[in-house]
Amino acid sequence: MPSHDVIVIGAGLVGSAIALRLAQEGLRVALLEKNAPGHEASWAGAGMLSPAPDTSASIPLVPFSRASLSLYPQFIAEIEDISGRRTGYRTEGAIELLFSADAERELSTLIALHHALGLPTEPLPLDEAIKMEPEITRRARAAAYFPYEACVDNRALIEALLAAASSSGVELFPDTTARQIMIEHGRCTGVRTENGSLFEARDVIVAAGAFSRFLEGIVPRLATRPIRGQMVALRSQQPISHVIRCERGYIVPRDAAVPPQAIIATASC
């Protein structure tokens, strides 16, 4: 008899959340992570929770993103309750700043697109934007407000989620690189690791993100790859309450009550 009912490969936010839910249903779950749990993409992100599309290619994902965002309040409350930790979840919304000479036309196009997608984005007078966030630049020519947008301290969230999963019975295996999904008679039987160890289970869930392409036994091989981004932690003169977006990047507030307090905002470009 296998020692686990399910093996989850990848201990990021997705894999850890899946493992937690399965354990809550009474299943024996092994969570495998090739490095330190939660320290890949889940650690590197900015924590924005937005259904607004960044490109035309992401427009088809908007309904899924809206549905996901609607589940977050209950999800966060549950994780914080089980783990006893805060996650820095905030719901003040986001401000988009436009700088081009054609900013007003760009704003109208943005509002029309978002409304067509069911997103209640609003035009925001610049003087109101400055009242909401006194630190923003006066060089902006137009602004929009995304009242539905939220953010979370992703590092605090993954730590809370891993604690919740562990306390719910998930068995975590750090520094354990899954190399091959074992198949017998057309059915998955487990996972073989890089050092030759075998984890047996009736079911295997792959949540390894861009690194899923290195797994043998998946047909066809997944053509995924990681994308590099740049982040910098800032200490602001005044507290920042909203996500601040523009064409070249964004600033995401951090909850000063969530250590380390020096991380007040995160920017990416």
Image (tube, helix red, strand yellow):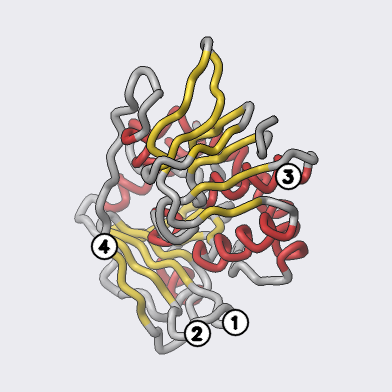
Quarter of the image containing the C terminus?
A: bottom left
* Circle 1 residue: 257
Q: Residue at x 49, y 20 (%)?
A: 183
> Depth check: 85 or 175 in front?
175
* Circle 4 residue: 230
- Position of residue 211 measured from the top left corner of the image (x, y, whole percent): 35, 41
- Whether pointer 3 and pointer 1 mark residues with C-beta atoms closer than 8 Å, the reply is no
Q: Determine the CA span between mark 2 and mark 1.
A: 7 Å
Q: Determine the CA span between mark 2 and mark 4.
A: 21 Å
Q: Quick one: label 2, few (<14), some, or many (20+) residues within 10 Å?
A: few
Q: Earlier in the sequence, mark 2 or mark 3?
A: 3
Q: Determine the CA span between mark 3 and mark 1.
A: 30 Å
Residue 75 to residue 187: above or below:
below
- On screen, residue 1 versus residue 254, left or right, reads right
- Amino acid at pointer 1: Ala
Instruction: Write down the quadrant of residue 15 in the picture.
Output: top right
- On screen, residue 141 versus residue 157, left or right, reads left
Q: Residue at x 61, y 32 (%)?
A: 201
- Whether pointer 2 and pointer 1 mark residues with C-beta atoms closer than 8 Å, the reply is yes
User: Mark 2: which secondary structure?
Assistant: loop
Q: Quick one: label 3, few (<14), some, or many (20+) residues within 10 Å?
A: many
Instruction: Write down the quadrant of residue 141 in the picture.
Output: bottom left
Disc on res. 23: 3
- Amino acid at pointer 2: Gln
